[in-house]
């Protein structure tokens, strides 16, 4: 698994929105990030965005 910058429970009342907001904040700060679902731990994880 790649580096995890932050994580949020999948059962959060706002769904993935907190993770999406955190990824957007990191991206604005110059660290491009994206959200993935980690099925094993049942959480949304914020990870660095990979260049294509």
Image (cartoon, grey):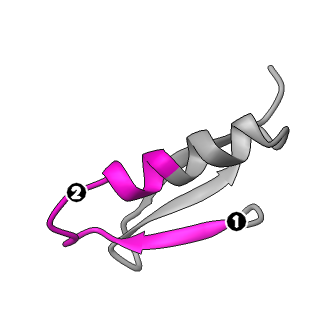
Q: Is residue 27 above or below residue 23?
A: above
Q: Give the range drawn in magenta.
A: 5-21
Q: Quadrant of the N terminus?
A: bottom right
Side of 26 where 45 appears, left or right? left
| Along the viewing direction, whichever of 41 and 8 lies nearer the viewer | 8
Q: Dot 1, how many residues are within 10 Å of its Cα: few (below 14), some (14-19), or many (20+)?
A: some
Number of numbered discs present?
2
Is 30 drawn above or below residue 5 in the view shown?
above
- Nearer-N-terminus badge (1/2): 1
- Residue 49 in sight: no
Q: Position of residue 26 (x, y in %)?
A: 70, 48
Q: Residue 15 carries which label?
A: 2
Note whether residue 28 is visible: yes
Residue 24 on image: x %, y %: 58, 39
Residue at the (69%, 67%) spot, across then down:
4
Residue 14 lies in the magenta-colored region: yes
Q: Mark 1 points at which residue?
A: 5
Image quadrant holding the C terminus, namely: top right
| SS assignment at label 1 | loop
Q: Dividing the picture into quarters, in which one does residue 51 lie?
A: top right
């Amino acid at each position: 698994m790649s580096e995890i910058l932050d994580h949020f429970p999948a059962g959060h009342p706002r769904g993935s929105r907190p993770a999406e907001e955190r990824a957007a904040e990191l991206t604005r700060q110059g660290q491009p990030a994206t959200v993935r679902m980690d099925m094993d731990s049942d959480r949304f994880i914020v990870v660095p965005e990979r260049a294509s």
